[in-house]
Image (cartoon, rainbow, N blue to C red):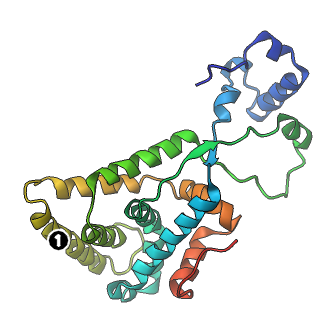
Amino acid sequence: DCERCQCHSEAKRTAILYTLLSQNLTHSRGGRSPGHQRCLCHQRRTVCLRTPHVTCQAASNVLVKTISFMKNLPSFHLLPREDQLLLLDSCWVPLFLLGLVQEMVTFEVMETPAPSMLKKILLDGQSKGQEPERTQPTLAAVQRLQCCLNTFWSLDLSPKEYAYLKGAILFNPDVPGLRASLYIESLQREAQRALQEVLQPLHPEDQGRFARILLIASTLKSIPPALITDLFFRPVIGNADIVELIVEMLYEITGGQLAP
């Protein structure tokens, strides 16, 4: 990963700027010796979208369709509002990712420029009370995300399979704090049963498809919401809270796009 790394070269060690930065990093890590510091090249392996305008627009469209899916479910609106909000907060990421797969949204990333070392040194200790710098997704995290999406594409789900799988994901009775967990569990069972019934005529020879779909769907829940927010929506919404915006879309906005 660091084939061009010069962090440990003699020239780098004697550079004044590197020396200052090393002292700064050692101080921030509680006085660790240089031998225990991580390679600076590894720390800089953060990424951003290669075409943010195109990809963020596509992601915004998918999110709007995801919220529309919830709004069009009468059984969802029969739930207590508190349960609706808990399900929304818990399930919006896997539902959004299913939307990316269904809409065949692809994207590429590129490494972001390394933060200015000189800026870090000069501004060290002066950022208290200021807004924290935005986090950037790591290359490893994005690769895990793309692996999940590619696995779903290999399933080649039909529109009905997508619809019932979304219902099974949305109505998750295991979300803590639900008031109507038993009713939500019955809705999940109903969605899973409908998914099984769809699979039988479509894939009669593939007896393990239902279990495989649910297993792969469970991997979507492991994708952190912060990664999805930082990668697809932070360039558009800035420091706004994505969940608050989604709630507004669900209860107030009848249609449209995310706006800066």
At mark 1, the secondary structure is helix
Q: Position of residue 137 (x, y in %)?
A: 60, 47
How crowded pointer 1 is (Cα within 10 Å; few <14, some 14-19, many 20+) is rated as: some
Locate the N terminus and report the quarter of the image it occupies: top right
Identify which residue, 108 or 225, lies in the foreground.
108
Q: Residue furthest top?
A: 10
Which residue is at a point 24% across and 73% down the rendered structure image? 191
Pointer 1 residue: 193
Which residue is at a point 50% across and 54% down the rendered structure image? 224
Q: How many marks?
A: 1
Q: Position of residue 127 (x, y in %)?
A: 86, 51
Identify which residue, 85 or 109, lies in the foreground.
109
Q: Position of residue 116 (x, y in %)?
A: 82, 38
Taking 13 as reference, is 202 above or below it? below
Q: Position of residue 82 (x, y in %)?
A: 47, 81
Query: Taking 9 as reference, is 174 left or right?
Result: left
Which residue is at a point 61% across and 63% down the rendered structure image? 233
Taking 22 as reference, is 64 above or below it? below
Query: Taking 131 as reference, is 126 left or right?
Result: right
Locate the C terminus and report the quarter of the image it occupies: bottom right
Mark 1 is on which residue type? Answer: Arg
